[in-house]
Image: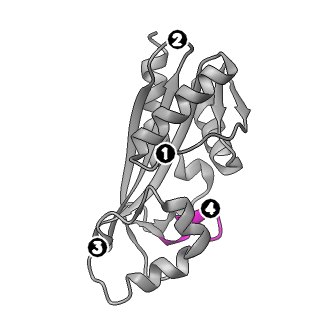
Amino acid sequence: MITFITGNKHKVIEAENIFKDYDINLEHIDLGYCEPQGTLEEVAISGAKYASRKLNKPVIVEDAGLFIKALKGFPGTYSSYVQETLGNQGILKLLDGVNDRYAEFRSVIGYCAPNSEPKIFLGKVIGEIAVEEKGDLGFAFDSIFYVPAEGKTFGELTTEEKNQFSHRKNSLEKFIKWYSIQ
C-alpha cells in the first residue's frame, strides 16, 4: 500500500491506473502542505518529508510542470498558478507567431518514509504546444500539449492511452521499480 498525497483527483486516477498494473494498492490522502518556491525536485522533497513526518508513514507526492522552450521553461514550477490565471488560451497567445513550440511535461515523484531522507524520481515526455486547443479529455494543459509520435494532444487521449507514455507514468514507474526491490 502506497499513500499518495495530492489534492488533484485527476492525478489520483492516472496513478491508480498505473499502480494497478503492478498490483500495488494506492491510498489517497488530501493533505495540504506548503510548497517552497523552487524546482519540481525541491517541492517534491519538501512535500514528501512533511507528509511522511505528519502521518508517520511512507508517502509519495508528485509535482509536475509544463516547460516551454521558447518561453525559457515557463510556466515550469508555476504551471498550476499559470493554468488558473492565464489558462490554455493565455499560453497560446504568448506563443502566437512562434515557430519553435518544443515543450516538455515533467513529473517528479517524491518518496519519504519516517526517519529517512526523501528520494526523487523524474519522468518527462517531449512534445510541442499546439496552435489551438484540441480534445476535452485530461486536464490543465493537456488540450494544448501535442505529442507528434501520437499525432494527438494529451486532451485527445484517454487516461489509458496517456498512461502508456506520460511524464507521470515515467516517474511513477521509476519509483515502482525502486520501491519493489526495497
| Label 3: few (<14), some (14–19) or many (≥20) C-alpha neighbours in 10 Å | some
Question: Which amino acid, mark 3?
Answer: Ala
**Residue at the spot 69% in from the left edge and 21% down from the top edge:** 55
Q: CA distance from mark 2 to mark 3?
A: 42 Å
Marks 1 and 3, the one that precedes in the sequence: 1
Tag in front: 2 or 3: 2
Q: CA distance from mark 3 to mark 4?
A: 23 Å
* Image quarter hosting the N terminus: top right
Range of the magenta residues?
Answer: 134-144
Up the image or down, 9 lies above or below 16; here it is below
Q: Which residue is mark 1?
A: 36
**Residue at the spot 49% in from the left edge and 41% down from the top edge:** 169
Up the image or down, 172 lies above or below 119; here it is below
Q: Which residue is mark 2?
A: 115
Q: CA distance from mark 1 to mark 3?
A: 25 Å
Q: Which residue is mark 4?
A: 139
**Residue at the spot 44% in from the left edge and 55% down from the top edge:** 77
Tag in front: 4 or 2: 2
